[in-house]
Amino acid sequence: MAPDSPPDRDPDSDFQAVGIDDDTRLVYRYVLAQGTVRVEDVAQGVPLEGTDFAGMLARLRAAGLINRTSGSDGEYTAVDPRVALRALTDRTAAQLDRVRSTIPDLAGLFEQTADVAGSGAGVHVIDDPALIGAWYTRMQHEVTAEFLAFDRPPYVLADENPVEPLALARGVQWRAVYAAEVLDLPGAWAELRHAASAGEQARIARTLPTKLAIADRRTALVSTDLDPQHPAAVVVEGGPLVDLLVAAFEAAWADAVEIPAGDTLEGAAPPDRGPNKDDRALLALLGSGAKDEAIARELGLSERTLRRRSADLMRRLGAANRFQAGVQAVRKGWL
């Protein structure tokens, strides 16, 4: 788990928890530093363009962090943050407590239509797309240390996953193996890179037998029917079956090909030299089994150029096919 307060973390970044965004935080710090300001002072002193400074000051005043003198051209003055911020955080904590107190009632409503209650060990068979999605989201919310996943079409939930970044921010180690067919989807390569930049570790496999998610090696969600119209899945909580699914993930992970994040395919190394970073990116995609059309579309190459570079790399590696080229590259230390 990540430490509560990393050395390089900006403590002001948590102001959003009390309703103060980054821009408003800058205005607040300016008021604290100046003591007394007018709207025009803030506009000149805070390096933000196209910003409603009057609105920001009004929000800070509504939060009790600053005061305003009377009159149409009133000035804003700082309130001691040792008093004002403590009062604001106390109010926020009280609001969160009230929300927390509604959980049992809301859970009761949810359980009337969804068999997802309870946390005891067992097996749940699910054949409703909404419930499959609910279990997957629940596992992401509850994971504390490690999340493992097989990712392949078809999908029950929308493309963007807003919960994964929250788990990564908590220090969760997230490893995903993607089926090569994922790269046939428009924008998939960009999404993989974005996830990698947030901390996800990803690899590509030629094929995957099913969809799988495992949280903390305790709870697993595995698809048993991939029919997009009638999907079905099994949730396993605890026991040797989860251990077996973890072993299956680790085996697929070991055989999958890692894709270097942030690489492009501009300029290949001469035949008598080792690979550059662009060659490594191409090798990784070839090893994954991704189709020419998908690679060319995502990386902005013509299929003709892609085929030429692919043939050159296979010749240098002595590989008979593209997947073998990926394996040979790993053995040679090129990947």
Image (spheres, rainbow, N blue to C red):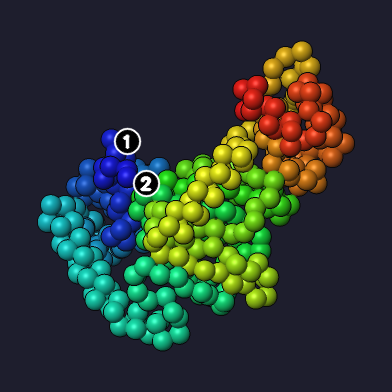
Residue 171, label in figure? 2
Q: Amino acid at mark 1?
A: Asp
78 sits left or right of 326 in the view: left
Q: Amino acid at mark 2?
A: Gly
Residue 182 x, y percent position in the rendering = 68, 53
**Residue under the point 24% across and 56% down:** 75
Residue 85 x, y percent position in the rendering = 18, 56
- The residue furthest front is 240
Residue 285, label in figure? none
Residue 8, label in figure? 1
For residue 287, what is the image quadrant? top right
Camera-side residue: 84 or 9?
A: 9
Q: Secondary structure at mark 1?
A: loop
**Residue under the point 47% across and 73% down:** 124
**Residue under the point 40% across and 42% down:** 47
185 sits left or right of 114 in the view: right
Q: Secondary structure at mark 2?
A: loop
**Residue under the point 74% across and 20% down:** 269
Kindly indicate whether the residue at mark 2 contacts the one at mark 1 (C-beta within 8 angstroms). Answer: no
| Quadrant including the C terminus | top right
Residue 34 x, y percent position in the rendering = 22, 44
148 sits left or right of 324 in the view: left
Q: Answer with mark 1 or mark 2, whichever residue precedes in sequence.
A: 1
- The residue furthest top is 272
Q: Residues within 10 Å of mark 2 (few under 14, many from 20)?
A: some
Camera-side residue: 186 or 138?
A: 138
Relative to 103, say whether 155 is above or below.
above
Relative to 176, say whether 270 is above or below.
above
Camera-side residue: 88 or 243?
A: 243
